[in-house]
Amino acid sequence: MADDKKQLWGGRFTAPPDETFAEFNDSFRFDQRLFAADVAASVAHANGLQRAGIISSEEADSIVTGLKALLDEADKRADYFATAKAEDVHSFIEAKLIEKISDTGRKLHTGRSRNDQVATAFRLWCRDEVDAAVVLIRRVERSLVDLAARHEDAVIPAYTHLQRAQPVLFAHWCLAYFEMLERDLERFEQARKRLNVMPLGSGAVAGTGFPIDRDVVARELGFDKVTANSLDGVSDRDFTVDICSAASLLMVHLSRLAEDMILYASTEFGFITLSDAVSSGSSLMPQKKNPDALELLRGKAGRVFGNNFSLLTMLKGLPIAYNKDMQEDKEAVFDTIDTVGISLRAAAVILDNASLNEEAAMKAAATGYLNATDLADYLVEKGMPFRSAHEAVGKAVLFAIKKGCELNELALGDLRQFSDLIEEDVFDRLSIEASLKARSTVGGTSPERLREALAAAKAKLER
Ligand code: ARG
């Protein structure tokens, strides 16, 4: 075993840590993911120490070169982390550096604590991952827009209470999810903005006694500014909750998308045919083709909510400032980021491979009195108060149900029993085309509005 496991805090202790305590305490097995971020922050810190005259240029060069060599080694050696033993990624890097450049390496930790160090490295890591999530959200948005474009004129029934309600364009359904993802994008971008503040220089809790120019260090690391209060700087984990709550809503949206598609892919609906590429079979029933990918999309939401809740619970009782409880922040965020990443990638593949069975969807939209509201609106246009029109059409629907036909299949004479305002032109209003065309306010499902909405969505993807 290399010297990696030597404690950073051994001086005051006369006995080594108990093995079980070490197993409980050590975070290296998961926080090694912060390796590159922590090296980057350490490089900037070394440069800051040098500019402040605390270490010489030669020492800073040696530290920076040594740190970069560690990055290189980690890149090249697949077992770099697997064979190492360390308390956490910070002590690992420091031990490796000292191993490489000896005593000069022992100067790196001047003026910083693992408390501001971990907060800084974690924010850097999160920033990259939030950026990556934003790219993946855009990718799913593109898949939705492409799916809409592949079926631009197709119609599906819209449901309320999962009962057929009114016809809408399939593209309208696609763009509903696009809207949700737009809000998710915005939330991730806001999370990024709030997290991009540098705690380094907060020291352990009270700030640092060395005259390091924090603003210059922050600029080097791409932070927008530095934290304004050292107590808050080392203990603020709002950014982890920001990420996990943005991720939670994103997963709500992906889950609802999945639920819609699971329903639509069932034989009962028959609207969507799932590609073999994203379906699984049954080990027992030879005929089965199951929407496993969609079910996982729906199922994985729960663990992200759980992570979000873990963080809130972990934070709520903590006395200011750093407490070891906070080490629990990593796995919650790592798991969230991993889950969101694979979920978004899966969602894109599912959508790219999905197609609408236009005929079946149209048939469903044409049956079940989805044009009843259109008939009521027709009567309103002829001068009847809406409430009376609603009543009259309700009776007409009951009549049609008894006859076993649709409203538009009734004879004019039959329809006129419910109001003599009804004339021959009513049949023009009862078609699906007319129903769609009528819903032309902003946000409605008319083909005209949809053309605009699709163009707007495409334009957003160009940004
Ligand atoms: N592994 C620790 C964490 O993630 C690093 C900070 C430790 N600081 C301390 N004072 N023990 O929170």
Image (tube, rainbow, N blue to C red):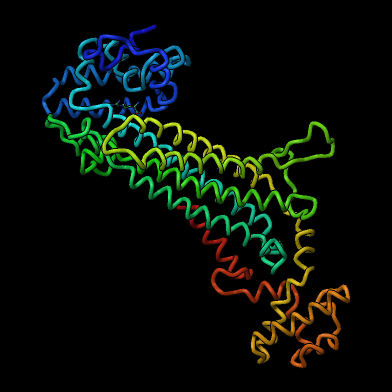
Q: Residue furthest right?
A: 403
Q: Nearer the viewer, residue 76 or 368?
A: 368
Q: Position of residue 289 (x, y in %)?
A: 77, 40
- Locate the N terminus by quadrant: top left
Residue located 38% across and 28% down the image: 34
Compared to residue 361, the image places residue 247 above or below, namely: above
**Horizontal arrangement in the rendering, residue 461 relative to residue 376 (left or right):** left
**Horizontal arrangement in the rendering, residue 417 relative to residue 141 (left or right):** right
Residue located 56% across and 51% down the image: 253
Total labels: the figure holds 0
- Taking the image in four quarters, ligand 1 sits in the one at top left
Q: Residue furthest top?
A: 1
Q: Quadrant of residue 227?
A: top left
Q: Nearer the viewer, residue 460 or 288?
A: 288
Q: Position of residue 9 (x, y in %)?
A: 25, 17
**Horizontal arrangement in the rendering, residue 96 relative to residue 177 (left or right):** left
Q: Quadrant of residue 120?
A: top left
Residue located 78% across and 68% down the image: 366
Residue located 32% across and 38% down the image: 318
Q: Quadrant of residue 319?
A: top left
**Horizontal arrangement in the rendering, residue 116 relative to residue 248 (left or right):** left
Compared to residue 454, the image places residue 41 above or below, namely: above
Q: Position of residue 108 (x, y in %)?
A: 22, 21
Q: Position of residue 100 (x, y in %)?
A: 29, 11
